[in-house]
Image (tube, grey):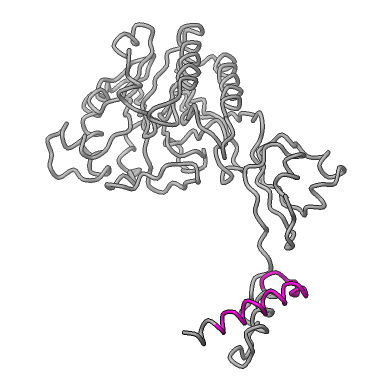
Amino acid sequence: MRFLHTADWHIGKKLAGYDLLAEQQFAYEQIVQLAKEEHVDAIVIAGDLYDRAQPSELAVKTLNAMLQRLNLTEKLPVLAISGNHDSATRLATGSPWYSATQFYLRTTLAAAFRPIEIGNTQFFLLPYFEPFAARQYFEEDDIHQISTAMKFVVKKMKSEFIPNKKHVLVAHFFAAGSSTTDSETKLTVGGLDAVPLTLLTDFDYVALGHLHSKNALHSEKIRYSGSPVKFSISEAEQEKGVWIVDTEFDQVVFHALKPLHDVRVLKASFAELSDSTFYKAQQRDDFLAIQLTDQKVIPNVMQELRKIYPRIVSLTRAAGPVVRPQMKRQIRKLDPLTLLANYFNDVTGDQLTEQQQQWATKMLKASQEQREDN
């Protein structure tokens, strides 16, 4: 069979205060179209459907419409699990009758051991869980880490394997050897930081969620789909998309998704950014992290730049020259003002202006007088 592997939709998420629903809807439309073109037999969503445990009314309405279209209109089986951002209880509302339309949603550890059979494949849907849930389910007091819990989980799943079937695990956790980005919630409390890949080798494919880059892990059969939308500046260089998995021919192909508005880092001076020749060549509606190369103070710089670039998510100063080890001086023999001037030059590459020297002299004098009074 062929299925589409996606995850980490995070419906309702914002980027630096900007609503991302339009971006998420744009990515979703591409997912629907791709599912049709590739004639997939099912859609797999590996957790974090919402961005928070108590999503807004609009987020709930948006996700409901997305799932209804896939499952009820397009008649595609949907296999989904809750992630660490989801409220398992809220997400599971109505699940007793979901299977009637082949909408399979798992939000509890106990439900993960009932495999779903579609075509030649058994799917095991393992939602995000914490060690205490495994301690209670398996009645094992020694389970304090996710790696220990997964030994019991995988063993029980394997007992349900049908030999002539393919076996797919859908899960939401941090796999050992993966790399992270700024937009992900770190699962490190209570030993939730790494699942050894050796525990997963008996599955023909492991569809993971939680990490937002498809390149977070390099493994033929164990993959993160990554999020369909960029959620932080640290993801600016990432290519977003989904996997199309064919269990009959053991083929996995990545399909990129286009962003409605990209997330980019733009490094330039204020003069360049304000020059029409420069900014007319830019996609000014993108979400931009601007790095100013200027060292001098620019009044109302954010207000002025937002007149040209409406979606600035951050504004920082580009780092100046780095102090090199060979730049050594007999600093103990220098007066404080000279030390300050040298340091300023080392860091910025510029000399103190006359006004800056006056400010420094005034502050040094005030500091000296305070020490004498004490």
Query: Horizontal placement of 182 versus 166: left or right?
Result: right
The outermost residue toward the front is 373
The outermost residue toward the right is 277
Residue 2 lies, with reference to residue 50, above or below; the image says above
Pinpoint residue 234: horizontal percent, then vertical percent.
56, 46
Magenta stretch contains residue 359: yes
Query: Horizontal placement of 233 versus 198: left or right?
Result: right
Which quadrant of the figure has residue 27?
A: top right
Residue 356 lies, with reference to residue 294, above or below; the image says below
Which quadrant of the figure has residue 144?
A: top left
| Residue 154 seen by the camera | yes
The answer to which of 319 and 123 lies nearer the viewer is 319
The answer to which of 21 and 131 lies nearer the viewer is 21
Q: Main secondary structure of the magenta part?
A: helix
Query: Horizontal placement of 270 versus 89: left or right?
Result: right
Pinpoint residue 177: horizontal percent, then vertical percent.
41, 49
Query: Magenta span covers which residues?
Result: 347-369
Pinpoint residue 337: horizontal percent, then vertical percent.
66, 83
Residue 101 lies, with reference to residue 161, above or below; the image says above
The answer to which of 50 and 165 lies nearer the viewer is 50
Magenta stretch contains residue 286: no
